[in-house]
Amino acid sequence: MSVSLFFTVALSVFAYSTVTSAEPVQYCPIKDVCYQVAVPSVSAEANSGNIYLQLRAPASYSWVGFGTGERMADSNIFVIYQDGTGNVTISPRTGTGHITPRYNAMTQVELQDGSGVVDDVMIANVRCGNCSTWPGGSISLASEAVDYLAAWKTGDAVDSDDPDAGIRYHDAHDQWRFDLTQGTVSGDANPFVGVSQFDNNNRGVSEGSFADPRTLIRGHGIIMAVVFVLLYPIGSSLMPLFGKWIFHASWQFLAFLLMWAGFGLGYVASQRIRLDFNSTHTILGTVVVCLMVLQPALGWLHHRNFAKHQARGLASLAHVWYGRALLIMGVVNGGLGLQLASASRTFVIVYAVLAGVMFVVYIAASAYGEYKRRMAAGSYERKS
Ligand code: HEM
Ligand code: HEM
Ligand SMILES: *[C@@H]1O[C@H](CO)[C@@H](O)[C@H](O)[C@H]1NC(C)=O
Ligand SMILES: *[C@@H]1O[C@H](CO)[C@@H](O)[C@H](O)[C@H]1NC(C)=O
């Protein structure tokens, strides 16, 4: 009974979604940089005619663009940048390889209502009259898997209404496939006005597309934040609080392994969008995790030394202060990462507050340890 109910509901949801997904398909390779395509059913049937595109990105981007194909060469590319008067320039270009794509005057593009720089977001709602064929190739407007690519560049506004304006080399790029049959809309009119589509959800991305880089980045961020803001400081506090080295060492070692898993995810994500290895976050992060390799070794050296002499040696000082320095660098680097990923304000606040709280907890634990040590040394002196 409940099983058949389940199937009835599932089937009607399925039927509903296949019949009435009269919504543009959307892909956002990174947060707030989104590309949409809508194909009017008349164009899908004729495999020619108007299609509608939307490109959207914060005004902190110098330009963003997307196009058809698997590589720049022979791609039908659409780039937007600010025109300097509060609107955007839509610039259709033809990819010719790994060089700046140049304006292609044959593509019939026209900005539609809703375009402009609104609340620091660049939006281009575009009608394209003949976008299914171009000098380098063609697509079927009724295809379930069309290759798309995108690239973006943060930085100064281009501020030009010249569709052939110079643009600078991208920060990163991405590829995916749209199922255009899911982006079929009924009327032949701008589908981007009067509807709330300002979300970051991917829709109509074909199966067999690549892993969503944002999921990788989010996983990386959460793991690294947990490791550097919670696990390492807690593990460091365990030592002065309980004085059991094996407790501290195993806790920190687990955090150390998790840190490498988080680094791995970050690496895969940066490869996935071909992020150039030139941001402070990626460089400092790599330096910190590599330097961290010495820390378990220093801890072990200290432990061996302490077991023999019952006193702190050079290795102890090195382990304690090197460790503290790396932890601070790690937490700061996490902040840079949040900036790079343009994380939400809530996320940044939670991160900063947790980091502050853990800092205080650790200082208190460490001071308590020092106090215990002084007391022990004092009573020893009195005894002797
Ligand atoms: C501003 C001028 C541009 C220059 C100088 C340029 C240069 C390059 C270079 C050197 C590569 C190979 C390096 C790599 O794989 O990371 C590349 C790849 C790529 N670019 Fe560009 N590019 C420009 C604009 C664009 C635009 C406007 C787009 C798309 C909207 C784009 C999309 C891509 C994609 C998807 C790749 C990887 C696929 C491929 O190798 O073709 N690029 N570009
Ligand atoms: C990545 C891994 C590690 C990190 C980040 C780390 C970090 C730290 C920090 C910050 C302290 C200072 C605590 C305080 O303020 O009193 C400390 C102390 C200590 N650690 Fe580690 N540790 C790690 C791994 C290890 C390992 C693997 C061992 C042992 C084999 C170890 C043994 C010790 C010992 C014995 C102390 C006490 C030193 C003293 O009070 O003189 N640690 N560790
Ligand atoms: C930008 O230009 C388009 C096309 O001319 C127009 O429809 C739109 O309203 C303009 N946007 C702004 C903010 O002026
Ligand atoms: C697009 O349409 C224009 C005008 O109809 C035409 O001159 C041009 O060749 C077409 N471009 C392509 C790539 O089909």
Image (cartoon, rainbow, N blue to C red):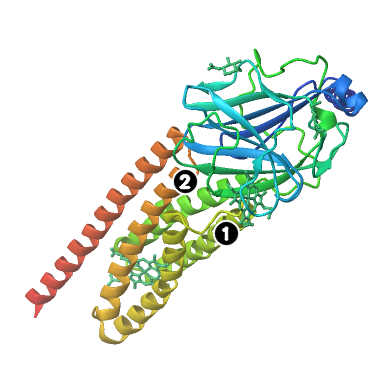
Label placed on residue 354: none
Q: Using residue 242 as the reference point, say whether residue 179 is left or right of it.
A: right
Q: Position of residue 288 (x, y in %)?
A: 41, 64
- Kindly identify the amino acid type of the residue bearing the numbered disc 2: Leu
Quarter occupied by residue 345 = top left
Q: Nearer the viewer, residue 101 or 245?
A: 101
Disc on res. 340: 2
| Residue sitting nearer the eye, 100 or 242 | 100
For image coordinates 92% across by 25% down, the residue present is 46
Q: Is residue 4 visible?
A: no
* Image quarter hosting the N terminus: top right
Left or right of 285 in this view: 45: right
Q: Against 227, is 107 above or below?
A: above
Q: How many circles with numbers are drawn on the protein?
A: 2
Q: Position of residue 362 (x, y in %)?
A: 30, 54
Q: Secondary structure at mark 1?
A: helix
Task: Look at 70% across and 37% down and name the residue there.
Answer: 104
Name of the residue lying farthest toward the bottom? 308
Residue 134 image offset from top left, x and y in percent: 80, 38
Q: According to the image, label 1 marks what residue?
A: 267
Q: Is residue 166 above or below residue 318?
A: above
Density class for disc 2 (Cα within 10 Å; few <14, some 14-19, many ≥20) is few
Residue sitting at x 86%, y 23%: 43
Q: Is residue 2 left or right of residue 192?
A: right
Q: Earlier in the sequence, mark 2 or mark 1?
A: 1
Dividing the image into four quarters, tell me where ligand 2 lies.
Answer: bottom left
**C-alpha distance separating marks 2 and 1:** 14 Å
In the depicted view, which residue is nearer to us: 38 or 243? 38
Looking at the rendered structure, the secondary structure element under dot 2 is helix
Q: Amino acid at mark 1?
A: Tyr
